[in-house]
Amino acid sequence: METCKLLHENVFAYVEKDLPPVLLQQLDKHVAECAECAAIVVEFKSVMILMEEQKSIEPRPFAETRILQGIESRLEKRQSSPLPVFIRILQPALISVGVVVALSIGFFIGTDFANSHSQYSQNEEMTESVRSDLNVPEFMTDDIIYFTE
C-alpha cells in the first residue's frame, strides 16, 4: 500500500527512469506484483506516447491568441456585471408565474366554455318544448332556432 502511494507520486519519474537505482528496483518489483500499479504504468506510458505523437501536429496560426482572448473576454464578462446571477435566480420564478397565469387563463376559458355549452343545451331543451307544444314534425325543422335570453 505504501509502495503504491510511492509509485503514484513518482509515476512520471518511474516511467522516465529518473529515480535512484534502489528506488527504481523497488518500484520495478512492486509493479511486477501489483496489477493495479502495473495498469497505471501501462496507461501512463500510452498517454506519454500519445503526447509525443501530438507534438508533431502544428496548431493553427494565432490559435493560442484567440483562445486566450476568448477566456479573457468571458472572465471580464463574468466580473463586470452581477446581472447574470440575478437572472439565473429570477428565471425560475418568472417561469413559475407564467405557468400559473397560463393555467388560470385555461381555467377561465374552460369555465366560459362550460357556461356557453350549458346555454346551448338549455336552448335545445327550449326548442324541443316549443316544437312539441306546436306539434311541429321533425322534418320541418331543418334550421334549428336557438332562443337567447
Image (cartoon, rainbow, N blue to C red):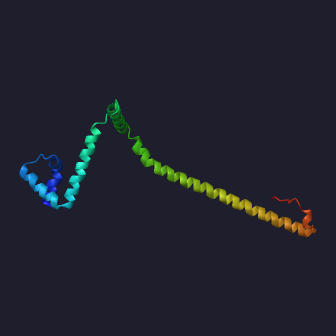
Q: Quadrant of residue 29?
A: bottom left
Q: Quadrant of the N terminus?
A: bottom left
Q: Nearer the viewer, residue 149 or 99?
A: 99
Q: Residue at x 77, y 62 (%)?
A: 120
**147 lies left or right of 91:** right
The residue shown at (61%, 54%) is 105
Position of the C terminus, as image quadrant, is bottom right
Report the side of 34 relative to 63 (left or right): left
- Provide residue 116's location: percent of width, then percent of height: 73, 59
Horizontal and vertical percent for residue 67? 34, 35
Say if 64 sits above or below 109 in the image.
above
Residue drawn at 15 percent across, 54 percent down: 7
Q: Is residue 13 above or below residue 130?
A: above
Where 18 falls versus 112 (above or below)? above
**x and y percent of residue 90 in the render?**
45, 48
Q: Is residue 142 left or right of residue 38?
A: right
Location of residue 84 in the rendering, given as x and y in whole percent from the top left corner: 41, 42
Residue situated furthest left in the rendering: 22
